Image: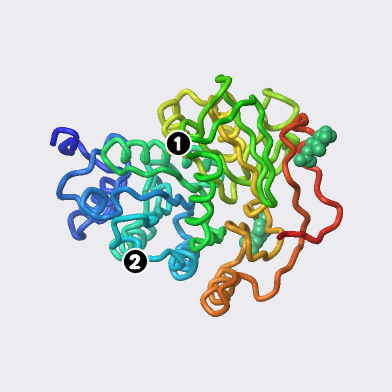
Amino acid sequence: MSKWIRGKHCQTIGFSIFSFLLGCMFTINLTPIDKTCKIEDTDREHNIMKNSKLKDPELIILVLSAPDNLDRRDTIRNTWLKLYDKRNEDSDINSFKMKHYFAIGSLGLKADQLLRLSSEQSEHSDILLLPMHDSYMSLTEKVKKSFVWLKDQYDYGLGFKYVLKCDDDSFVNLKALPVEISTMEHTFLKKDHRYTVQSNVQQSSFLSVNVQTNEKVVTGNVLNLYWGYFSGAARVKTRGKWKETSWIASDRYIPYALGGGYILSKDLVSYIAKNAEDLRSFNSEDVSVGFWLAPANNLLRAHDIRFDTEWTSRGCRNTHLVTHNISRQEMTIMYKNFVRFKSLCFKEVDKRSYYVYNWSVPPSQCCKPFTENVIRLQ
Ligand SMILES: *[C@@H]1O[C@H](CO)[C@@H](O)[C@H](O)[C@H]1NC(C)=O
Ligand SMILES: *[C@@H]1O[C@H](CO)[C@@H](O)[C@H](O)[C@H]1NC(C)=O
């Protein structure tokens, strides 16, 4: 049992702030926080992971959220998280298990904010409080710290395979995603799938993929997945909220999956976590992840037009796995549509065009949008 280190030095930041502010008046239920905090056997969260059938979820959903966005979190809890089939948790075989966390920075919060988070946590046990100040300027730090925490959980027995990072204004089709993850595995990642070329472009109606490997032949089972809607041609921003003042790597960003939602294999999450302190963090977390993964070997980059993850949504499409930058009302409507009609959109609408990433040309030419705005899907 030595693998489960007892947490006698375990001191979570949220806890200390809380006790400092409120003395011992409350039972603190703020869950695991610091990477140095090895969770106690008696700890509720530990037991959730160790004992529950969710011990080995396929997918961790990491939703970046802000302390005061309770309304957004509640909307997510009441909409797309409900698309996940809870029966999976009771079934041992061939069922898809997932666990979600809302990542929030806990430093510098006011007493009333902590109180609200604490009661939210007692009710839902799904908040990952991180020892950092929460602001949009620190999203990259938040991703790093969350990955470090997830890697620790993995090392302590939570055996996930993928992490989906999204925002609290993203809608994830949790009915379709498990099926698509499995299709992805069978199409590209299964053991007997052999890639024989350095740069392998494969097309389906939704996907264009690229494999980066040092081997002459690589089998699917050693490939790590980086899956989302990629950009390779984006110019480095020099002004505005997302400006990068010290980017010198290249004229454009390194190809990266846009931040409204992307999926990483566990090994990529570990790789980033292990090197977190040595990796340069840029303002945009998604740009940073693309930059960090640029040198990774055995990497399968999958561009997928079902990830509607640009800064604003391209419209409503029933095939979308993730839709970003939508309001709580829109989330509720999509959820209700799904419950009633088994489709997200009452009527499919295209507001913007999309592109299929061309991996065989330089990144600056990768991403030419189709001129016609009508998406022709099979
Ligand atoms: C979408 O993003 C823009 C820019 O960040 C923001 O102003 C707008 O409120 C967002 N819309 C929704 C529905 O969240
Ligand atoms: C990518 O670009 C090359 C060169 O322009 C072109 O020959 C090829 O058909 C393109 N591939 C796709 C999938 O669009």
Q: Position of residue 302 (x, y in %)?
A: 61, 41
Q: Position of residue 117 (x, y in %)?
A: 36, 59
Residue at position x 76%, y 62% from top?
Answer: 351
Q: Position of residue 284 (x, y in %)?
A: 60, 39
Asked if the residue under mark 2 is in contact with the one under mark 1, i.e. CB atoms within 8 Å, the reply is no
Label 1 Cα crowd, 10 Å radius (few <14 / some 14-19 / many 20+): many
What type is the residue that disc 1 sits on?
Val
Q: Which residue lies under the disc numbered 2? A: 87
Q: Could you give the CA–CA distance between mark 1 and mark 2, rounded to whole angstroms? A: 28 Å
Q: In what quadrant does ligand 2 lie?
A: top right
Q: How many marks?
A: 2
Residue 77 placement: quadrant = bottom left
Residue 17 against residue 237 in the figure, above or below: below
Q: Which mark is residue 269?
A: 1
Disc 2 secondary structure class? helix
Q: Quadrant of the C terminus?
A: bottom right
Disc nearest the viewer among 1 and 2: 2
Is residue 358 shown left or right of residue 145?
A: right
Tell which residue pokes out farthest to the right in this image. Answer: 371
Q: Position of residue 265 (x, y in %)?
A: 47, 39
Residue 145 against residue 49 in the figure, above or below: above
What type is the residue that disc 2 sits on?
Arg
Residue 96 against residue 154 in the figure, above or below: below
The first of marks 1 and 2 along the sequence is 2
Disc 1 secondary structure class? helix
Q: Is mark 1 within 8 Å of ligand 1?
A: no
